[in-house]
Amino acid sequence: MEPKKNRSIGLIIRRFFAIFIIVSTVSGVITQIETGTFTNEAFGSVFVSMLIAYYLARSPRNNPQSPDLNIENNNEEFDDDDEMKELIEEFEETLQDIQIEDAKSSYKSDRVKKNNPVKDAQSLLSRIFQGRTDRY
């Protein structure tokens, strides 16, 4: 006996809307036939509504795997300590090279002091949001 599949709330809501679209389409076609206003446009509208209902009602393609499945993890470890030591040595060498390059490129020039042409106590934000009164 298989356990029940857990259905998401979103899928249930989508299927509800799909059933609503199907019922409303069928009732619309019946009404058109009863009143005698059935036209060629009805075929296209029925096709489009059934297509929409199909895409709403179907299950998503990428179903997440249930946690009940046994997934084997292959955790391979290095058997050779020599290979690991070589990798650590190479890493330390490249780390030293990177630190030397960072030391060369982190040179900062002296900051040039510029005079502010506006010598009042207003901040930049207050100047931006201050309205101009001498526009005209």
Image (spheres, grey):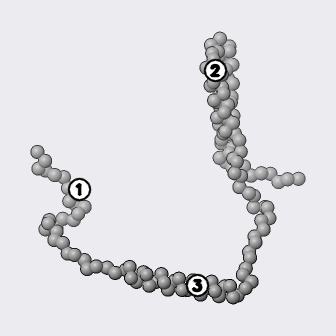
Q: Dot 2 lies on which element?
A: helix
Pointer 3 or 2: first along the chain = 2
Q: Residue at x 75, y 58 (%)?
A: 66
User: Is there any visible trace of residue 84 in the rendered image?
Assistant: yes
**Residue type beneath disc 2:** Ala
**Residue type beneath disc 3:** Glu
Residue at the limit of the structure toward the right, as seen here: 1
Q: Residues within 10 Å of mark 1 (few under 14, many from 20)?
A: few
Pointer 3 or 1: first along the chain = 3
Q: How many badges with numbers are in the image?
A: 3
Pointer 2 or 1: first along the chain = 2
Between circles 3 and 1, the one closer to the viewer is 3
Between circles 3 and 2, the one closer to the viewer is 3
Q: Residues within 10 Å of mark 2 (few under 14, many from 20)?
A: some
Q: Dot 3 lies on which element?
A: helix
Q: Dot 1 lies on which element?
A: helix
Give how far across and how far down residue 120 sits, in percent: 14, 67
CA distance for labels 3 and 1: 57 Å
Residue 18 falls left or right of residue 1: left
Question: In the displayed structure, would residue 123 be above or below residue 87?
Answer: above
Instruction: Find disc 2 in the rendering and name its residue.
Output: 42
Q: Residue at x 22, y 60 (%)?
A: 126
Q: Residue at x 16, y 71 (%)?
A: 115
The quadrant where residue 44 appears:
top right
Q: Which mark is residue 129?
A: 1
Residue 68 falls left or right of residue 108: right
User: Is there any visible trace of residue 120 in the rendered image?
Assistant: no
Instruction: Find disc 3 in the rendering and name its residue.
Output: 90
